[in-house]
Amino acid sequence: MSKKAFWLVAGLLAAVAAAVIPSVASNYMLRVVNMTMITYICVLSLFIVFGMAGQISFAQSGFWGVGAYITAILTTKLHVSPLAALGASAVGTAFLAALLGLALFRLRGHYFGFSTIGVVMILNGIFQNWKPVTGGADGIANIPSFGIGTFEFGTETSNFYLILAVVIIISIVTWILRHSPLGRSFMAIRDNEIAANCMGVNSYLTKNIAFALAGMYCGIAGSLFAFLANYISATTFTFTQSALYLVMLMLGGYNSLPGPIIGTTLLMLLPEWVRFLQEYILLIYGLGVMVLMVVMPDGLVGGGKKLYEYIQNRRRRNGWPNGVAGSASNDLG
Amino acid sequence: MVWQLIIAGLAMGIVYGLVAMGFVLIWRAVGVVNFAQGEFLMLGGFVAFTLIEMAGLPVGLSLGLCALIMGLAGVVFHFVTYWPLRKSWDITVIISTIGASIALKETATLVWGPAPLGVKPIVPGIAKFGSVFIDWQFILTIGIAALLMAAVFFLLEKTYLGHILQATAQDQYAASLIGIPVVLATGLTFAISALITGVGGLLLAPIFFVTSTMGSVTGLKAFAAVIIGGFGSVEGAIIGGILVGMVDTFSGAYISTTYRDAIVFLCLILALIVRPQGIFGEKISEKV
């Protein structure tokens, strides 16, 4: 399947899904789909920081929370219009991420990842305890739904179209980014930071841009979440959530755009399909993650590609080194 | 007051130190961060509950049995999460340990239920030193943990087996060339790591309640201890653990009980910015 045909098929499928899902799905299922799309934006942010720039980050769910709280506080306490709140969430979170990045990118490789664990724990501590601003353990309730002018996105279906529109825009932006000089410099840093520096890439600044951009994605996702749920509390924005983003990205495949889509969809919708397992769901979930990683270390997209290549040409397959970062071919995304 | 806090902080710190040591041993042996390390602690706590409260075994026997069970659990963990992925990228092992952490937490909830479980102290009562009152449990925790640490040190530095483990940690390929069975060495390292962390859980069980989530926060704080102490350094893990325990206890007592977790991680970030390589530095520097 050529690249063009793939995107054509994917686009058609998405269009059909967008037309069909709201009319056939129950309100509950639609909420799950909406949450999946919001999570997808966060996973996409990790795709930029980790998949493209190679910097592992556990701070994403913290930024997601920052975006949600900015929107919640602006709309409930200061009565700012929803559109302005969405913008403020995006800009504010990006600004926070950039500020943190300036300090944390003095650390390299794994150490940066470790420090982001600190970031998400601290942010969560603030959400949980700064009562006058974040409402403490009670969270913030009565957040209005998104609206432009007099039109309000009050129903699950209208929210679906709103979030879908944002998802499509962000996906296209990410696709353009991936093929832009900036995106290429991200990937150069991932593959070899010293070589990238030698080629004239300012890795400190570039990593910071990636981190701030990812922060912006999370801010937007957080804002959408606040508008959708109308209620937020600190228990949502935890380290575990960030770890799940990483799991979704790695299971889908970190090196191509379909990866985050597949990984997020699989891990978000899977628990719904196996509801009948009840209390065993999370156990199966954990075991499933382990098994999938063991069977397909390159993620589902990478694994699928390998299988495809294997069928196409057995000799060619022998030439691929196993599991080296950036070794997977780039014919998708 | 201050002495009580110091002893309590030291007891917490030395348990963090045990978990941190568990992190470091695995990191040194296979170069992987084990995100399920905290779950070993939780498992140790539940095993302690089963042995002491449910089976009613004497404490000494329980300690030995708990160590044995956790050692076996470490070996199983090694073969399930690490061994199949040993040749691929380290992030994949991290993901598989995250999966294992979810699975272990859920298994614990299914087996022991979601309610917090209490375990009676190993030695009940309070010791009196002059005007200072200290729980025996704290003193015993410090004693047992220190002994365990000393034993691991002795094993690693003074015995033939320890040298095998260290050789494998330095270079698996070279170790296999001189006839060291790598799978045994890494398996044993996981066993030791799970063992000391599990005993940490047993020691912590009477101080806190045993819950399926007790490992998450403790594990992350121990991880902070590893980084503050210096990644890859066993001494650093212990010192870092004690520092984190002290910060944890004192900030809880004097600054704010609700912000104590945040303060610990703020210290982590500050430590990373001031001295990224940690107090003792990393033994193997990053290659170009």
Image (spheres, grey):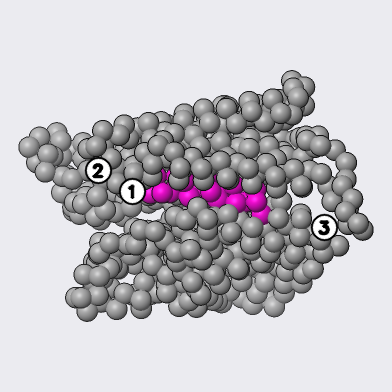
**Residue B128 versus residue B266: which sits nearer the camera?**
B128
| Image height of B262 relative to A259, above or below | below
Q: Residue B93: horizontal and vertical position, in percent?
A: 39, 43
The rendered magenta stretch, by its main secondary structure, is classed as helix
Label 3 sits on a secondary structure element that is: helix
In reply to whether residue A143 is colored magenta, the answer given is no
Circle 3 crowding by C-alpha within 10 Å: few under 14, some 14–19, many from 20: some
Q: Say which label, 3 or 2, has the lower sequence index.
A: 3
| Amino acid type, label 1 | Gln
How far, Cα to Cα, is label 1 from label 3?
41 Å
Q: Are marks 2 and 1 in contact (CB under 8 Å)?
A: yes
Magenta segment range?
B13-31
| Residue found 35% across the figure and 32% down from its top | B183
Q: Residue at x 77, y 66 (%)?
A: B256
Q: Disc number at residue B4? A: 3
Mark 2 crowd level (few <14, some 14–19, many ≥20, 10 Å Cα): few
**Distance of mark 3 from mark 2, alpha carbons?**
49 Å
Please give the residue where the numbered disc 2 appears in the rendered image.
Answer: B174
Residue at mark 1: B170
